[in-house]
């Protein structure tokens, strides 16, 4: 399957231009952290977001942010726990930066005024989550992402950054392997954004699964657009399925924070029997739950131990409580749960400073794949990654922009025939893509299931090439194919990637998969 370099119909000569020193695509915690630190360096970025600035997955993050701030903790312990969870695939230098500079960035948040929960003596309360050896997760009840994001966003707005809400990315424009601009639209009118550099911070691709915790239709299509621009992608097969999403037939899989288990909630089957250590790494807990369902038993998160300890569930977890209320479960002590696609470890291959293989294109947060999470992300390291890479990319962009210039080259991708697919047709194809991935590229995979998915995704991709208004779907098929090819190439089970036909880790695959724009999979040493 080859792909078109540009899928959208446009001619930049006929489109109004917007000029910026640097543009950030995405207003989640990674994007606004980058904006915050760029402003401190004297660069005023333009931020583009397809929703309002507060509508992102990181703003919905419940559990907290991990940092070795406890009296008995150390960055060495945090480093070691992250490596252990990553099952041999973590890039150790990047992990060391994550945990050491992460502690510094969390202190930045404290001094900014993020109201992390404190005990009666005024000390910051720390929660223990899965695969952490001790309590090191800072939180603001169960709306940590929102409280962190709110304060940073308020700061950057007060500095009057150029915030373009309601616009989404269509094309990344390049010339001879170098970034030159973006094509964006609000659904009615297109603009060319001409800047020295771009930071992609648009989130992950768990939204390509039928059952997922991703909000606001975040699906990862910008990663597909970056792929078409020449960016290499890495570790796409590693999709983390959160063990505990509310399970009500026909309803969305809203997340129940790992912090609920950290506070003592237990997982039980229909007989009320506990069957797994709830604080094991997420891949192990998720598969244990799935196996119960395959055996014909539902699974419940029992919050009775919290209540017996005198914890006011509504007070400690107001966000989770409101979710349960949506389902009519607010008075239940046993909440039906099952795994749901949650966090994507793969993405645009980048270093810890956000640099990709295309000059001028930087990627951070869940959009990027830097190797800090290995084959399985340690709980609450995601928000930490956002603020660390947001900080690092600001300095990287500062240096790049010193030598870059805004290029006014024009690109023509007009076509004579503009055939359009109606909304019902687009909606049905999106549902089909999600179901293909859920049924065949989920928690448990085989060569047979992966090959079924590959053929069906390629058929959809070929069909889409006949239309000019399906760029979003087209980029999702590129991303889906990349994930399938990566899963086929990794003939082992490691972390969140589980092959039923290759159930063990194999030393020969202690490497990262790298997908190049010719759809070849290369293995890169850790």
Image (spheres, rainbow, N blue to C red):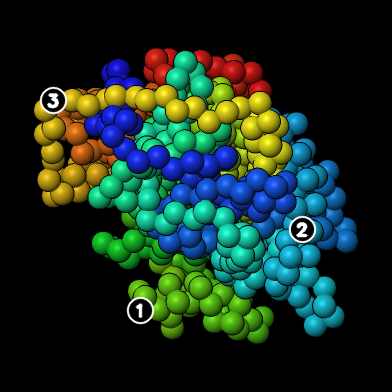
Q: Which mark is residue 416?
A: 3
Residue 525 pos. (x, y %):
64, 18
Q: Which mark is residue 108?
A: 2
Q: Earlier in the sequence, mark 1 or mark 3?
A: 1
Q: Secondary structure at mark 2?
A: helix
Quarter of the image for the N terminus: give it. Answer: top left
Disc 2 and disc 1: Cα gap in Å?
39 Å
* Dot 1 crowding, Cα within 10 Å, few <14, some 14–19, many 20+: few
Above-or-below relation of 272 to 349? below
Q: Earlier in the sequence, mark 2 or mark 1?
A: 2
Q: Earlier in the sequence, mark 2 or mark 3?
A: 2
From the viewer's side, name the closer residue of 227 and 303. Answer: 227
What residue would you read off at disc 1?
A: 328
Q: Secondary structure at mark 1?
A: loop
The residue furthest right is 71
Quarter of the image for the C terminus: give it. Answer: top right
Instruction: Report whether 388 appears left or right of 275.
Output: right
Residue 153 pos. (x, y %):
59, 62
Contact between marks 1 and 3 (CB within 8 A): the answer is: no
């Amino acid at each position: 399957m080859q792909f078109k370099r540009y899928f959208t119909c446009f001619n930049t000569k006929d489109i109004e231009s917007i000029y910026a020193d640097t543009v950030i695509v995405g207003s989640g915690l990674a994007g606004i952290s980058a904006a915050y630190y760029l402003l401190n360096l004297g660069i005023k970025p333009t931020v583009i977001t397809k929703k309002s600035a507060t509508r992102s997955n990181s703003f919905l993050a419940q559990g907290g942010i991990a940092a070795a701030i406890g009296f008995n903790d150390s960055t060495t312990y945090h480093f070691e726990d992250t490596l252990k969870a990553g099952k041999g695939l973590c890039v150790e230098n990047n992990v060391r930066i994550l945990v050491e500079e992460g502690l510094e960035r969390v202190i930045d948040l404290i001094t900014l005024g993020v109201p992390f929960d404190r005990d009666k003596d005024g000390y910051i309360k720390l929660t223990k989550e899965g695969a952490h050896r001790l309590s090191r997760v800072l939180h603001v009840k169960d709306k940590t992402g929102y409280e962190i994001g709110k304060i940073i966003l308020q700061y950057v707005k007060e500095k009057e950054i150029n915030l373009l809400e309601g616009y989404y990315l269509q094309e990344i424009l390049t010339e001879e392997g170098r970034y030159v601009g973006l094509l964006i639209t609000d659904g009615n009118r297109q603009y060319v954004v001409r800047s020295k550099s771009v930071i992609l911070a648009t989130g992950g691709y768990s939204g390509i699964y039928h059952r997922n915790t991703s909000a606001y239709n975040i699906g990862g299509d910008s990663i597909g657009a970056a792929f078409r621009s020449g960016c290499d992608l890495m570790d796409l097969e590693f999709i983390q399925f959160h063990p505990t999403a509310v399970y009500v037939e026909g309803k969305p899989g809203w997340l129940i924070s790992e912090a609920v288990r950290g506070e003592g909630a237990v997982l039980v089957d229909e007989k009320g029997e506990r069957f797994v250590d709830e604080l094991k790494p997420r891949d192990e807990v998720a598969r244990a739950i799935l196996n119960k369902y395959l055996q014909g038993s539902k699974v419940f998160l029992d919050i009775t131990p919290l209540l017996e300890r005198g914890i006011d569930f509504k007070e400690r977890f107001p966000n989770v409580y409101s979710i349960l209320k949506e389902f009519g479960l607010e008075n239940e002590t046993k909440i039906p749960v099952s795994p749901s696609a949650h966090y994507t470890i793969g993405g645009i291959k980048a270093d810890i400073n956000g640099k990709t293989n295309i000059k001028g294109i930087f990627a951070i947060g869940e959009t990027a794949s830097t190797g800090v999470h290995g084959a399985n992300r340690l709980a609450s390291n995601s928000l930490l990654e956002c603020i660390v890479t947001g900080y690092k990319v600001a300095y990287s962009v500062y240096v790049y922009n010193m030598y870059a210039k805004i290029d006014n080259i024009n690109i023509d991708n007009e076509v004579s025939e503009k055939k359009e697919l109606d909304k019902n047709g687009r909606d049905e194809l999106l549902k089909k893509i999600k179901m293909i991935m859920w049924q065949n590229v989920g928690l448990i995979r085989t060569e047979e299931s992966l090959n079924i998915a590959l053929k069906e995704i390629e058929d959809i991709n070929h069909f889409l090439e006949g239309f000019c208004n399906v760029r979003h779907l087209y980029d999702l098929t590129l991303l889906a194919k990349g994930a399938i090819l990566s899963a086929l190439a990794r003939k082992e089970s490691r972390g969140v990637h589980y092959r039923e036909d290759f159930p063990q880790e194999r030393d020969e695959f202690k490497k990262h998969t790298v997908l190049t724009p010719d759809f070849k999979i290369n293995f890169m040493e850790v």
